[in-house]
Image: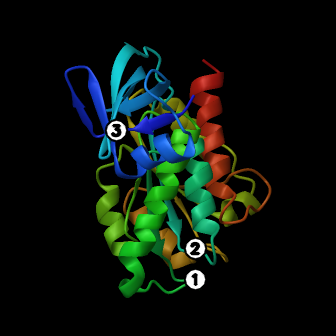
């Protein structure tokens, strides 16, 4: 069943306009009486389309869903800017796996240079990818996608998180296996975790040292060296396994 994230809710009715109305009417070809799911304020409800006008679609709540599909902890992914469409892949698949936020950042080894002139359109595209992935995976919230920041700004943003980890390939080479697991074991429902990943070529020693000075722990993601677009997905899958499949 089609799911939509809706911002306007009043008197047990949702009001969908713009792209959502277009999708309902012209793509899905739904009619009055058809059912959809509306997500609002981290909750979702089964609804019946009550009215379709030239400006909006009105959907009336049939029943609210009780079960949450969100990860028990809030996981933010900070990714060094990679080449091509790799970040789009991370945002799409990371949303499906439960990430709550994406923070791209410019790292020392980032080949791509952030173009401020194209910033607004780029971030708007990333946010749209997150929205579509959240609808497809039946999420109850849309992850926020930050405008790319530098490492100094990332450190400032990190102060609001309960736990902070940086994935460092040198730890994997040296056989470190415990930090990710021990961190997840200490976390409680509702707490937040910031995971930092480097771009192609990884993070340099100075960046890792600076992160450690700001209360990050470095960890490995197993014995194999993962690509920049694979590592965040591995970590999110580990979080899901720990909190959702082992319970």
Quadrant hosting residue 154: bottom left
Which residue occupies 35% across, 57% down? 158
142 versus 232 height, above or below: above
Circle 3 SS class: loop
* Residue 230 x %, y %: 70, 58
Mark 1: secondary structure: loop
Q: Which residue is mark 3?
A: 6
> Which-is-in-front pick, marks 1 and 3?
3
Q: Residues within 10 Å of mark 1 (few under 14, many from 20)?
A: some
Circle 1 residue:
109
Tag 1 and tag 3, C-beta contact below 8 Å = no
Q: Residue at x 47, y 49 (%)?
A: 131
Q: Earlier in the sequence, mark 1 or mark 2?
A: 1
Label at residue 203: 2
Quadrant for residue 242, please give it: top right
Mark 3: few/some/many CA within 10 Å (<14, 14-19, 20+): some
**Quadrant that contains the C terminus:** top right
- Does 213 appear above or below 57? below
Seen from the viewer's position, the closer of residues 122 and 52 is 52
Question: Would you place residue 112 above or below residue 62 in this image?
Answer: below
Q: Residue at x 44, y 45 (%)?
A: 100
Q: Residues within 10 Å of mark 2 (few under 14, many from 20)?
A: many
Comes first in the chain, label 2 or label 3 = 3
Q: Is residue 166 left or right of residue 66?
A: right
Quadrant (top left/top right/bottom left/bottom right) for the N terminus: top right
């Amino acid at each position: 069943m089609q799911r939509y994230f809706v911002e306007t809710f009043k008197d047990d009715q949702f009001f969908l306009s713009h792209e959502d109305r277009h999708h309902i009417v012209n793509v899905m070809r739904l009619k009055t009486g058809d059912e959809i799911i509306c997500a609002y304020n981290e909750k979702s409800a089964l609804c019946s389309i009550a009215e379709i006008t030239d400006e909006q679609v009105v959907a009336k709540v049939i029943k609210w869903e009780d079960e949450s599909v969100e990860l028990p902890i809030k996981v933010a992914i900070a990714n060094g800017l990679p080449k091509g469409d790799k970040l789009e892949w991370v945002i799409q698949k990371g949303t499906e796996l439960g990430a709550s936020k994406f923070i791209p950042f410019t790292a020392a080894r980032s080949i791509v240079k952030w173009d401020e002139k194209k910033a607004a359109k780029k971030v708007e595209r990333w946010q749209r990818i997150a929205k579509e992935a959240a609808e497809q995976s039946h999420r109850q919230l849309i992850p926020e996608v930050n405008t790319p920041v530098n490492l100094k700004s990332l450190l400032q943003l990190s102060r609001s998180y309960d736990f902070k980890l940086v994935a460092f390939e040198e730890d994997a080479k040296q056989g470190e296996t415990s930090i990710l697991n021990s961190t997840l074991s200490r976390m409680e429902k509702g707490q937040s975790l910031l995971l930092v990943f480097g771009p192609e070529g990884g993070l340099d020693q100075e960046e890792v040292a600076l992160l450690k000075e700001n209360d990050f722990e470095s960890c490995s993601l197993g014995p194999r060296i993962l690509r920049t677009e694979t590592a965040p997905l591995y970590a999110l899958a580990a979080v899901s396994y720990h909190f959702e499949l082992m319970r």
